[in-house]
Image (cartoon, rainbow, N blue to C red):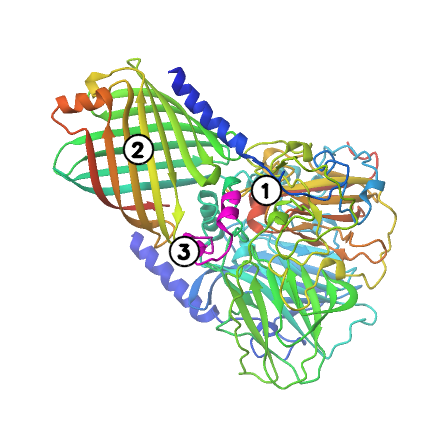
Amino acid sequence: MRRMLGLVLLAVALPAQAQTMDHSAHEMPQSETSPAADPHARHDMGGDETIPKGTPPPVPTDHAADALYDPAVMARARAAMVKESGGMIFSQLMIDRLEYRVQDGRDGYHWEGEGWIGGDINRLAIKSEGEGAVGGALESAEVQALYSRAIDPWWNIVGGVRQDFRPQPERTYATIGIEGLAPYWFEVEGQIFLSHKGDAHLRLEGSYDQRITQRLILQPAVEVNLAAQDVPEIGIGSGLSDIELGLRLRYEIAREFAPYVGVNWERKLGDTARFAREEGEGASATSLVVGVRFWF
Amino acid sequence: MNSIALDRRTLIRGAAALTLARAFPSWAQSGTVGLRPAPGVLSGERIELTVGESHFATGGRSAHAVTINGTVPAPLIRLKEGQTVQLAVTNRLKEDTSIHWHGMIVPFQMDGVPGISFPGIRPGETFTYEFPIRQSGTYWYHSHSGMQEAMGHYGPIVIDPAGPDPVRFDREHVIVLSDWSPVHPHILMKRLKQMGGYHNFQKQTLAGLLAGKDQSFKERMEWGKMRMDPTDISDVTGSTYSFLVNGHGTPENWTGLFAPGERVRLRIVNASAMTNFNVRLPGLPMTVVQCDGQHVQPVETDEFQIGIAETYDVIVQPTEAKPYGLIAEAIDRSGLVRATLAPQAGLVAPVPTLRQRPLLTMKDMGMDMSGMDMGQNGVIDLSQPANDSMSGHSMKMLDPSVAPNVPMGPGVATLSAMPADRTADRPTGLEDVDHRVLTYADLKALEPNSDTRPPTRSLDIHLTANMERYMWSFDGVKLSEGAEPIAFRHMERVRVTLINDTMMPHPIHIHGHFFQLVTGADAATNPRKHTVNVLPGGKISFDLTADAIGDWAFHCHMLMHMHAGMMRVVTVRHEGDAA
């Protein structure tokens, strides 16, 4: 558990390091004054330095227009104007993957998506993912309800609940995590889950959009799941339980609508693999995927 | 029931399209001889304007528009300095509307900003503005409600001087530049919040790298490490916008007539919601005679950048009896509009190919490292003593100590570590074109400034953003977050410095005032402006005499930046009046 926390913390610490761009290699003519200490030290054509900072007047507590128009009507108009200047609510529903999987044995299907509503800082989000065999049973299905809060320019913390409808028995987890954009434009996500039975898990995901042309995009993606203990009833062993690698090539007919093809490789590891074999399932699966990504 | 209602609406829209799609005021009609008293030019002591809804179409794209007296652009209002005018504005929309008289010196309660100067105009109501005309020049008017301005609610104002006009011309045309999308501006903004680069189809690609285009692999890694995109020049692009001259796209080819040898005055207004343009007339030098309605000492150039809400008056003198193109190219080169100046109707000037999309540099990120290789536009400042104090120093893209008044948070992704005064710089994309380009430093007031007192205090305002989250603000705080007004004492003189911490130019506008842009040592000839385009990563200073009592809006004129929170209320009060 401690190791997992460490991993999440590492993910948080990463962007802070990356803010710095080292220019020590560049030799620059420079005045004595450090630019950080005094951004006005250079380049001032008008001679800012001679103008004192001065004292601004107190901010008035009245509103000038209230003297000429009904103050109650002005108050309503003012509230609307302020709200329209940065306080608006937006939303998005993104089905990142809706795909058919061609693989050994029965072909499968998979979905993964997220919806959010809120402002720039605080949002409510719903996430869902799952998969199953075509003509067979639904193998996994989870839904998360999350509160998301932006904590810096690049990262959000999320917290909430996750309900797994499959595999059975159903399980409920509390979750906390972090998601955002790492240096070099990597989309990164890490979540810790603690079930109502007391078992703890960590999920780490990352992906990268490599634009080949303006509309053709190759997306490598990775997901790793770890567990703090064996949970045999849902087939999970402690430690690194599974790893999934994907490579999807999508074509954005519109930004909102992109069909794709790709490959997906999953491997169960350690006790998780053993549990799977005992159930008569394979520990690894490779599939060719064809699907669509869409959002609005 | 529903389908019947829909059908009826479609029918009504169809009918409106038939009757209104090609309705323009006469000055904006193609093939116009130029400005003269005519329908579509509104003059006199009392003017009636009706804001309504119509259909608008250009170049095969069509949609709903907000119009005044049925047209896009709205009628030309032509007034005379010294007169008084009443403007009765009737709202036929289903939502509130307003008109702001951009650049006009009016009492604050006539300035037309709902929630600051007045309550707004409700559906079905008529509000009568009344004010004396105390200035002359080229101005414009537009809605300050919702995003109606992006849907066609804008028009030009020309005010003739009370005395003789210092500008000599034989003919004049009004050129209203704008951008128009069939997609509702609220949807455009939503898409930007969902995906900041939604409209950018000129990003760097792997195919481009292999073809040797754009940045080198090393530079791409450096920029990627910072999560900065050097192609992020415009938020909303030609992928959805049609660019218009007087409501005409390139296919409709707006044409203004001239007789060879005439001095033709072009009164150019950028009424766009989100587009800065580079303007040129290939083969015709332009003499700039006015900027933001204020005369400047005539200066000849071949191209200039017009920020949103700025106006430029230029004189051109076509000598040959042939068509000349008037080209307004979006600064990200995602599109352009061609109009034609011609000796007779029916002639068509060629459409130039779009020039290469520019790439932003470290200077646009506020790291003006003199002596460092910054591409073609690196200015080496030899006046600075050279030493090694920066060696081993790491330059940060987000060092809070360079802006102690700006609270750090999700809305501030970068701070310009070394912002340069960029008033003498060629604007974005024009750094290395092989003809003359106007810079702000070329503008000198023709009539000396009346107030040349040295400022008694200074004020820094940071233009801040997180382009990925599409958050825009002043000093890291959105207006909606309860930002305090910026307070001035009546008649005090303040040196305001705008520091652009973002990689986009921001046309910043203050209502009710002109400021003097600090471009040189002579305070008497610093150009007077109402809107100033602050180049990426740079800074600009202006001296403001707070001579207009009241509450005023102060904002970025990129409409969606304003709506994202890049706005403040400015208060001007007599000393001691602040309750």
Region of the chain picked out in magenta, as a range: B201-223
* Place of residue B578 in the rendered image (x, y in percent of width and height, measured from the top left): 78, 34
The quadrant holding residue B570 is top right
* CA–CA distance in space, label 2 to label 1: 37 Å
Q: Specify the amino acid type for callout 1.
A: Met
User: Which label's residue is closer to the chain start, 2 or 1?
Assistant: 1
**Residue marked by disc 3:** B207
**Residue marked by disc 2:** A128
Residue B523 forms part of the magenta stretch: no
B236 horizontally vs B542: left or right? left
* Place of residue B384 in the rendered image (x, y in percent of width and height, measured from the top left): 78, 46
Numbered circle sitting on residue A81:
1
Q: Chain of mark 1?
A: A
Q: Residues within 10 Å of mark 3 (few under 14, many from 20)?
A: few
- Disc 2 is placed on an element classified as strand
Q: Residues within 10 Å of mark 2 (few under 14, many from 20)?
A: some
Say which of marks 3 and 1 sits in front: 3
A80 horizontally vs A233: left or right? right
Q: Chain of mark 3?
A: B
